[in-house]
Amino acid sequence: MEIEKIIMFKEEVAVRYKQIQDEICRGLEIADGKGKFEEELWERNGGGGGRTRIMQNGAIIEKGGVNFSAVHGKLPEAVKKAFKVNEDDFFATGVSIVIHPNHPLVPIIHMNIRYFELNEETRWFGGGIDLTPHYVFENDARFFHHKLKQACDDFSTEFYPKFKTHADDYFFIKHREETRGIGGIFYDRLKPENTSLSWEQILDFSINVGETFLPIYTELIDRNRDKEFTEAHKEWQYQRRSRYVEFNLVYDSGTKFGLETNGRIESILMSLPPQANWGYNVQPAIDSEEYKTLQLLKKGINWI
């Protein structure tokens, strides 16, 4: 692929990612029914910038971020070491989404699709979608995983089982010995050599993952938004949110990459919930709804 083609390709990726951001923001405003996204355009000192869109205090979405960025510049030494590369100049573009609902029976959702490039040889796609219910409903979990499997199977039947296992391993809170939620799919460093797909096909797969987000999440909102809940449900929601915070600040590679590359702090930390509680040694009663949820926060559950 000549240099011109690569430049055109990365521009195509960024344009298509922007469209995904637009579609998802429109769809979430409709699904919420009240909240509107506020947009902040920002520029990165080293090069590039992005569009941060945040919804706060909607009818269902208490705090949600749908971010697009396309940045370039010099790669810091710490990142070079982590990526095991020597090149200096990088380009990275992606869409990153985290939605925290106010309703404890509506799940937290996270999606990320991204493309990273150092040169013609060293470049890849990454991303995924995962779900963090405060209360795990098995029907919802099966629906969620079924939709992700469909999105993967359109490109390769090997994708879902592999990426599902990656998600189970990645979204694991080691110090708590539990998964962050019910997983989903997670993939990194996808390129023609390890997928048997062309660069264009991998981009199409990335877009397919992005386009799966809205139908999944609007369905999960609609299934649960009218259910009644108690103060005890809210307390548990705040408790589960604190686990989300722990994972993001201790383990999440996107957060680490953003902080290492001098990224925009508000955009990086938009994944954090507006409120979370750290009760001391919270142990739900055996056979309670909360207890049953904890039994399902394990690796290797087959939801299909």
Image (spheres, grey):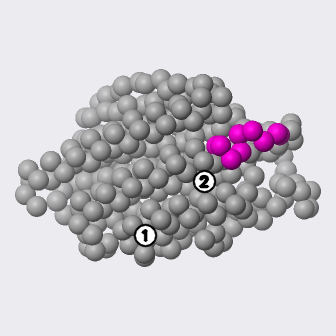
* Mark whose residue sits in front, 2 or 1: 1
Q: On the rendered structure, is 44 left or right of 269?
A: left
Q: Could you tell me which quadrant the C terminus lies in?
A: bottom right
Front residue of 59 and 182:
59
Q: On the rendered structure, is 47 left or right of 64?
A: left
- Whichever of callouts 2 and 1 sits on the residue coming sooner in the sequence is 2
Q: Is residue 206 above or below residue 265?
A: below
Residue named by callout 2: 131
Query: Is residue 212 rendered magenta in the image?
Result: no
Q: Is residue 277 above or below residue 297?
A: above
Q: Is residue 42 above or below residue 149?
A: above
Q: Residue at x 83, y 40 (%)?
A: 229
Residue 234 image position (x, y, % from top left)? 80, 39
Q: Could you tell me which quadrant the N terminus lies in?
A: bottom left
Front residue of 49 and 215:
215
Residue 36 image position (x, y, % from top left)? 52, 24
Q: Residue at x 75, y 52 (%)?
A: 135
> Which portion, as a residue range, is magenta?
221-229
Q: On the rendered structure, is 87 left or right of 147?
A: left
Q: Residues within 10 Å of mark 2 (few under 14, many from 20)?
A: many
